[in-house]
Image (cartoon, helix red, strand yellow):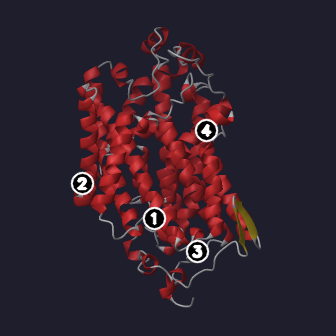
C-alpha cells in the first residue's frame, strides 16, 4: 500500500485542526470539563455505595483522600496522554484511535462504541433530571414516564436541529450548580467537627428483605471512589483527544486537565462529602439519624439544610434545567459518531432508535443505577484509554498513523480489559468482585497491548478456532496527516 487511497474515506477526509482555531486552556478544555463534573447527577449520587455510611463510613478524611487519588488518576491516566495525541495531531479520537485499533477497527472502537454509549448517558440524564423536577411535581406512574419521554425527545430534536442555540444558552448554566454547592457547604460547615461516621452507620435501617451489608472499610471507600469516578470519566477521558486537538501546546493540555478534570472532580464530590457530613453533624442531622432517616444524596437534603422545602424544590428544578444541554450534547455526539461509521443511515433514524432505548432505560429505572451504569461505561472505555495510552508510550509520543484493517493488539487488549471491567456484574455467580474494576480494565488494556505489541507473533485460542498471528500489529498505512503533527 503506497498511497493515501489505501485508507478508508473517513481517514482520507480528516483535516487537522489548524492552530488558528485553537484556544487557551481556560477558554475551552477547563470550563467544558468542569461543566461535566458540575452535572448534579455526578456529585449528588457519589456517596451512596449501597452500604451503611456509603463513602463516609471511614470518615471525611478518608473520603476526601480517596476522591483526590481518583481525580489525579483521571487526569494523568485517562486524560493527559490522549489529549497530547490530540494536541500534536489536531485530529479527533476516531482518527487517532485507528493507530491502536486499525483503520477498519477504528470504525467500531472507539468510534461506534462512543456513539452507542452516549445513549446510555442520555438515559441517565433523562432519569436524573426527571426525578429532580419531580421533587416539585410529585408525579408517579404514567405522568412521570411522560416527563421522561418529553425530556428525551426534546434533547434529541434540539441536538439535531438547534444545537447552536443550546450551546449559547448553556454557557453560564454551570454557575447554578456551583452556586448551590457553595451555599450548601456554607450552611453545613459548622457541623463538620461533630460528624461521627459510626453514628451514621448505626442509623442505617435494616432492609425489608435480606441482611444489611457491612460498611466499607478505608480500602473499600478507596475502591468505591475509583469505581464511581473513573467509571464516570472514562468516555470523557477518551474524548481528551478531541479536547487536545483544540489546545495550543503542552501547557494548555496540562493546565486544562489539572483545573478542568482533577480540581473539578475534587471540588464537586468534595463538596458533596462536606455537605452531607456537615449536615449530620448538626443538631437537625443528628435528630434525623436518631429517627432512622438516613439520606446520602446532598440534593435530597436541601430541604432540611435550608429549612424550606419550597426553596429545595425550586433548586432541584434549576439543577434539572442545567442538565438539559448535556442531554443535547450526548445526543449530538451519538449522531456524529454513528454518522461517521454508518454514513448512509439517516441520523433521525439512528438517534430516534437510541432515544427510544434511552427512554426505556430511564422508565425502567435501570438508568438510575448510577454505580452499575458508570462501572459498565468504565469497563467499555477503560481498556480503550489504557491501550491508546500505551500506544503513546511505545511510539514515544509520536502518533504513528492508522494501521491496516483490525489491529490485533488493540482489539485483544480491549477484550481482556472489558471482561475484567464487567466482572463485578457477575460477582454473585463467581463469589467475588474485582475491586475498582474500571481501573483494573484500564491497566489490563495497557498491559496486554504492551505485551502483544512487543511479541514477534502469538496464537489465540477461541474454541473451536485457533488463530495464529505472525505479526501482533498490522502495518502502518501511509497517511500525510501523521507527518503534520507537532513535535511539542
Is disc 1 placed on a helix, strand or loop? helix
Q: Where is residue 101 in the image (x, y as percent from the top left)?
A: 57, 68
Q: Position of residue 5 (x, y in %)?
A: 48, 87
For residue 331, side relative to residue 449 (left or right): left
Which label was assigned to residue 399? Answer: 3
Above or below, 481 against 60 in this view is: below
Alpha-carbon distance for marks 4 and 3? 37 Å
Q: Residue at x 40, y 54 (%)?
A: 32
Mark toward the viewer: 4 or 2: 4
For residue 353, side relative to residue 53 (left or right): left
Mark toward the viewer: 2 or 1: 2
For this orientation, the residue located farthest to the front is: 464
Which label was assigned to residue 242? Answer: 1
Mark 4 vs 3, N-terminal side: 3
Is the C-beta separation of discs 4 and 2 under 8 Å? no
Is disc 2 placed on a helix, strand or loop? helix
The image quadrant that residue 24 belongs to is: bottom left
Is disc 3 placed on a helix, strand or loop? loop
Residue 462 visible? The answer is yes
User: Pointer 4: what residue?
Assistant: 426
Mark 4 vs 1, N-terminal side: 1
Q: Where is residue 224 in the image (x, y as percent from the top left)?
A: 59, 36
User: Pointer 2: what residue?
Assistant: 157
Is the C-beta separation of discs 4 and 1 under 8 Å? no
Alpha-carbon distance for marks 3 and 2? 37 Å
Amino acid at each position: 500500500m503506497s498511497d493515501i487511497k489505501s485508507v478508508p474515506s473517513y481517514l482520507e477526509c480528516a483535516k487537522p485542526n489548524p492552530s488558528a482555531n485553537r484556544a487557551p486552556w481556560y477558554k475551552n478544555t477547563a470550563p467544558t470539563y468542569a461543566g461535566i463534573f458540575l452535572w448534579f447527577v455526578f456529585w449528588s449520587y457519589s456517596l451512596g455505595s449501597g452500604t451503611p455510611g456509603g463513602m463516609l463510613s471511614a470518615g471525611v478524611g478518608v473520603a476526601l483522600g480517596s476522591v483526590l487519588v481518583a481525580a489525579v488518576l483521571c487526569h494523568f491516566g485517562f486524560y493527559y496522554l490522549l489529549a497530547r495525541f490530540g494536541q500534536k495531531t489536531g485530529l479527533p479520537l476516531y482518527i487517532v484511535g485507528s493507530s491502536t485499533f486499525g483503520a477498519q477497527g477504528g470504525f467500531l472502537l472507539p468510534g461506534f462504541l462512543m456513539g452507542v454509549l452516549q445513549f446510555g448517558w442520555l438515559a441517565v440524564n433523562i432519569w436524573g433530571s426527571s426525578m429532580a423536577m419531580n421533587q416539585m411535581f410529585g408525579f408517579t406512574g404514567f405522568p412521570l414516564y411522560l416527563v421522561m419521554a418529553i425530556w428525551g425527545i426534546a434533547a434529541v430534536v434540539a441536538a439535531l436541529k438547534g444545537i447552536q442555540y443550546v450551546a449559547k444558552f448553556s454557557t453560564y448554566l454551570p454557575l447554578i450548580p456551583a452556586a448551590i454547592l457553595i451555599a450548601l457547604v456554607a450552611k453545613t460547615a459548622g457541623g463538620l467537627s461533630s460528624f461521627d461516621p459510626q453514628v451514621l452507620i448505626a442509623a442505617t435501617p435494616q432492609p425489608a428483605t435480606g441482611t444489611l451489608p457491612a460498611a466499607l472499610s478505608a480500602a473499600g471507600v478507596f475502591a468505591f471512589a475509583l469505581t464511581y469516578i473513573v467509571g464516570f470519566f472514562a468516555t470523557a477521558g477518551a474524548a481528551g483527544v478531541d479536547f487536545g486537538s483544540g489546545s495550543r501546546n503542552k501547557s494548555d493540555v496540562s493546565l486544562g486537565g489539572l483545573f478542568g478534570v482533577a480540581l473539578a472532580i475534587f471540588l464537586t464530590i468534595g463538596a458533596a462529602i462536606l455537605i452531607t457530613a456537615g449536615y449530620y453533624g448538626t443538631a437537625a442531622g443528628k435528630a434525623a439519624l436518631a429517627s432512622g432517616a438516613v439520606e446520602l444524596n446532598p440534593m435530597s437534603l436541601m430541604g432540611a439544610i435550608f429549612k424550606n422545602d419550597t426553596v429545595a424544590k425550586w433548586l432541584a428544578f434549576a439543577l434539572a434545567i442545567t442538565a438539559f444541554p448535556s442531554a443535547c450534547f450526548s445526543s449530538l455526539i451519538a449522531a456524529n459518531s454513528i454518522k461517521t461509521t454508518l454514513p448512509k443511515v439517516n441520523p433521525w433514524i439512528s438517534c430516534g432508535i437510541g432515544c427510544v432505548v434511552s427512554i426505556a432505560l430511564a422508565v425502567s429505572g435501570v438508568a438510575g443505577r448510577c454505580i452499575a451504569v458508570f462501572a459498565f461505561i468504565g469497563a467499555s472505555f477503560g481498556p480503550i484509554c489504557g491501550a491508546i495510552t500505551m500506544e503513546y508510550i511505545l511510539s514515544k509520543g509520536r502518533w504513528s498513523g492508522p494501521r491496516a484493517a483490525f489491529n490485533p493488539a488493540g482489539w485483544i487488549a480491549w477484550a481482556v480489559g472489558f471482561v475484567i471491567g464487567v466482572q463485578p456484574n457477575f460477582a454473585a455467580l463467581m463469589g467475588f468482585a474485582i475491586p475498582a474494576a474500571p481501573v483494573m480494565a484500564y491497566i489490563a488494556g495497557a498491559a496486554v497491548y504492551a505485551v502483544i505489541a512487543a511479541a514477534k507473533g502469538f496464537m489465540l485460542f477461541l474454541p473451536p478456532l485457533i488463530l495464529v498471528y505472525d505479526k501482533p500489529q498490522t502495518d502502518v498505512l501511509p497517511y500525510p496527516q501523521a507527518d503534520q503533527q507537532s513535535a511539542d
